[in-house]
Image (tube, grey):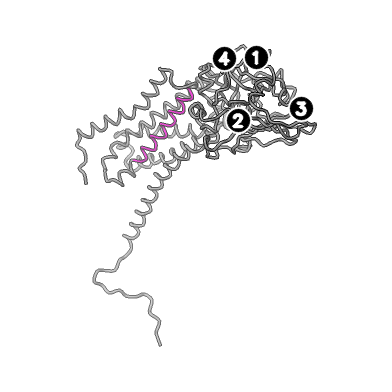
Amino acid sequence: MTKPPSAAQLAAIKALLFALCLVPFALYMQRWFDDALGANPIEAITRGSGDWTLRFLLITLAVTPLRKLTGLNWLLRLRRMLGLFAFFYASLHFTTYFWLDQFFDLQSIAHDIMKRPFITVGFSAFVLLIPLAVTSNNYAIRRLGGRRWQSLHRSVYAIGILAIVHYWWLVKADILEPMIYGLILAALLGMRGWWREQERRRQIAASMPRPMPGGKVIPLVAKSPRY
Amino acid sequence: AKLGPLARSPFSSDEPQTPYKSVTTYNNYYEFGTDKEDPAANAGKLAVRPWTVRVEGLAGKPRTFDIDELLKLAPLEERIYRLRCVEAWSMVIPWVGFPLSALLRQVDPQGSAKYVEFVTHYDPKIMLRRPVLDWPYTEGLRMDEAMHPLTLLTLGLYGEVLPNQNGAPVRVVVPWKYGFKSAKSIVAIRLVDKEPRTAWNKSAPSEYGFYSNVNPNVDHPRWSQATERRIGEFRKRPTLMFNGYAEQVASLYQGMDLRKSF
């Protein structure tokens, strides 16, 4: 197995990844100021920030499967940053809606959240992301204890599903893109389910009494006598 | 190519016109892709000549019109209309054309013709093959809507022939209805006695009714229709009943429950 990166190498990888994660944001900012976002820039920004939220959610959820498949355990050290970037783009997505699209019209926003299922679902997903972002630090892990922290952070599976539903319900007729994202999420969650089931079976098998090496196997059911 | 001379119309709006670039790069023409920029990128493949439009069905004199005939059938007018998309954005577009009624009168509609169905061009070799909608795209109007002076058989915009992505070479524009009612690249117009099924209605009957009149009081099941974003503007503006054409068309729907007949 390859050697894990040294502390200095890991710091460099993290710095590079951080810059990379900001590229979509930078490109959208540049296109906004160059007036290059097409006829409806607010829609373009809303769509773009939503797309990138979903992509970062999926990338974050891909870390564990990738680690298991490659054996590169240090990949786990990048997960927090990726998850926080998912929250960063989700915040931009929400701010775009709140500010550029609705222009702080609280009444209209409240109406939307209550009456439009796709906005209800998207808003729920965003609200559920907040505690995860807030507890994405070592202090919170120590405070909560690993087990509780982990069960809290497993809500990201539900958030992923809500995000797909949000996208699926907003498109008019062409469900190709939400379907692709949905299939990727299904694969990422399916792998976890599969591994968990394998682990469960392994543990059951391990807890079953096994014949002693060299011992004699005594059949519990007597053979029927032959005449 | 330039069209002209163009008569002015009392139906024209004097609001600022949406820039040509926005009108021709922000389109819903799903046969050429479902993103707004797709039609401008892909519709170049559409061959708009030769082109004919069959006007058939319950007509005394059904016949096929060549596009060059259509261009000379009636005096061309410039009609600056508001366009309100069901997605809650809007534009102001200087269309060129003449009332659809001028074409329909040519074929002598029978008394039994209660509706008009528009069949549009579909060529899987150059268009989307995925069944996002039931191709070919069809639309329809009630006969009195089709004969209404606002309903425009449209051959151009901004004084020129229609760009392909805007529905070349011939489309209808029905300004008091959501944009999808204004079928593009028409190949046949059928006079029928029953309300025709339409592409969006087939796709989601609870969301897109046959009438689809612009109505700020009846929301789309998934979003509000109370306001709209005029392309080029930052803040949303209130949506007007019948897209601001109530004076001309409200009488067509007298006694109808527009919540039910949405």
Q: Which of marks 1 and 2 is in front?
A: 1
Lower sequence index among marks 3 and 4 = 4
Lower sequence index among marks 3 and 2 = 2
Q: Nearer the viewer, mark 2 or mark 4?
A: 4
Which residue position is annotated with label 3? B255
Tell me whether marks 2 and 4 sit on the same chain.
yes
Residue type at the position of mark 3:
Gly
Which residue position is annotated with label 4? B17
Image quadrant in which the C terminus of chain A is located: bottom left
Under tag 4, what secondary structure? loop
Q: Which disc number belongs to residue B141?
A: none
Lower sequence index among marks 1 and 2 = 1
Prevailing SS of the magenta stretch: helix
Residue type at the position of mark 1:
Ser
Query: What chain is tagged by disc 3?
Result: B
Which residue position is annotated with label 1? B12
Query: What chain is tagged by disc 2?
Result: B
